[in-house]
Image (spheres, helix red, strand yellow):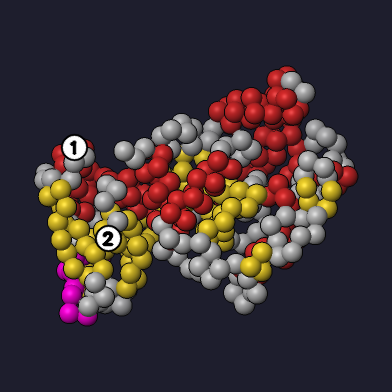
Amino acid sequence: MITPREHVLGRIADHLVGLGRPLRVAVDGITASGKTTLARELTALVAARGRSAAHLSMDGFHHPRAIRHRQGRDSADGYYLDAYDFSSFSRLVLEPLGPGGDRRYRSRIIDLRSDVAVDEPPVPAPDDLVLVVDGSFLQRELEWDEVVFVDTPFAVARDRGTRRDTELLGGPEQAGHAFDQRYHAASRRYLDEVGPAERASVVVGNEDVARPVLRRIGGRADAVVNLFSYGTLQAPSVQIEHFGRTLVGKEDVLPGHRQDWVTITDPAVVEVSGTDRHPIVRRTGDAADAVAGTMLEVTTAELAAADVYEVDDYRRALVRLGSGEVAWVYLQA
């Protein structure tokens, strides 16, 4: 049975699979928020959906110690301003994978543990690559196709980080001091100056790693996106239950697809919709096939709520409707 974490991260993977090629994805957040673990899991879920995927850590793009510690080992400003070589990362990774790039990128320029520069050959990127990169301060200077912000309270992240880094930093007291004076002080500056959660296209609450919360998906906090519904999401009662309002929509059709039916076993979904028999759509590619429905305008928080509502028989994909509008739709998984 799929776990709550797999369900939420699977929805993010569905979202990424439906977007451009290649795709440059940041996994951002405060220090010890759970970025690396989430990035690795997300990369595996994207690959499981049939798209090329790779994970890269900003650990391989640190400045040498002489630069990143030049303001002092405990300096928050030093960590914020001097830790990462963003210029090299942009030139060697983001630009090659961007429009007009040669699709040959570097996976690292330094071995962090030994503090030795490395000059490895570029990695050729498949046309459909989703590159998932985890690190801190990723929206300060860099431009991405998608950003997943891992939203974890400071107290929770501090506890995780000090336990993780106790041996590395010389004991629990020293680790706690490093987080208070350097890592999280820099993270607070980042949140204040950049507002990374508001700018991110996906926000996931990671306080409870077993039960993460999908808070937003599909764009920034003020974005509005199209969602085509052919089933229960058209019902005002379902909309009010999950979105707190009735949605603005207009009739449309989805060409090249055919509707079938699926039996829902999730009691919460059955209770809200009033039935265990839900329509489901699959792509046929036949121009004679079409599914009627409604194109709804939703916020990115409401798209996240729809992702949580839909069971795993459905996967969200980006389609072009009969009207010419582009919209998200839940298709047969």
* Residue 67 locus on image (x, y percent): 85, 47
Q: Tell me the SS state at disc 1.
A: helix
| Foreground of the two, 247 or 97 | 97
Q: Residue 184 carries which label?
A: none
Question: Looking at the picture, which amino acid does disc 2 mark?
Answer: Leu
Q: 301 left or right of 203?
A: left
Circle 1 crowding by C-alpha within 10 Å: few under 14, some 14–19, many from 20: few
CA gap between label 2 and label 1 equals 21 Å
Q: Is mark 2 on a helix, strand or loop?
A: strand
Q: Is residue 90 visible?
A: no
Q: What stretch is highlighted in magenta?
A: 287-295
Between residue 222 and residue 147, name the one nearer to us. 147
Q: Name the residue under label 1.
A: 267
Badge 1 amino acid: Pro
Residue nearest the observer in this picture, 107 or 179: 107
Dot 2: few (<14), some (14–19), or many (≥20) neighbours within 10 Å? some
- Residue at the limit of the structure toward the bottom, as seen here: 287
Whether 289 is among the magenta residues is: yes
Residue at (26, 68) in percent of width and height: 283
The N terminus, quarter of image:
top left
Q: In this view, does 323 lie to the left or right of 16?
A: left
Q: Which residue is drawn at 61% across and 40% down?
A: 30
Res. 90 image quadrant: bottom right
- Residue 181 at x, y percent in the picture: 74, 30
Vertical side of 148 occupied by 256: above or below: below
**Can you identify the residue that label 2 sits on?**
331
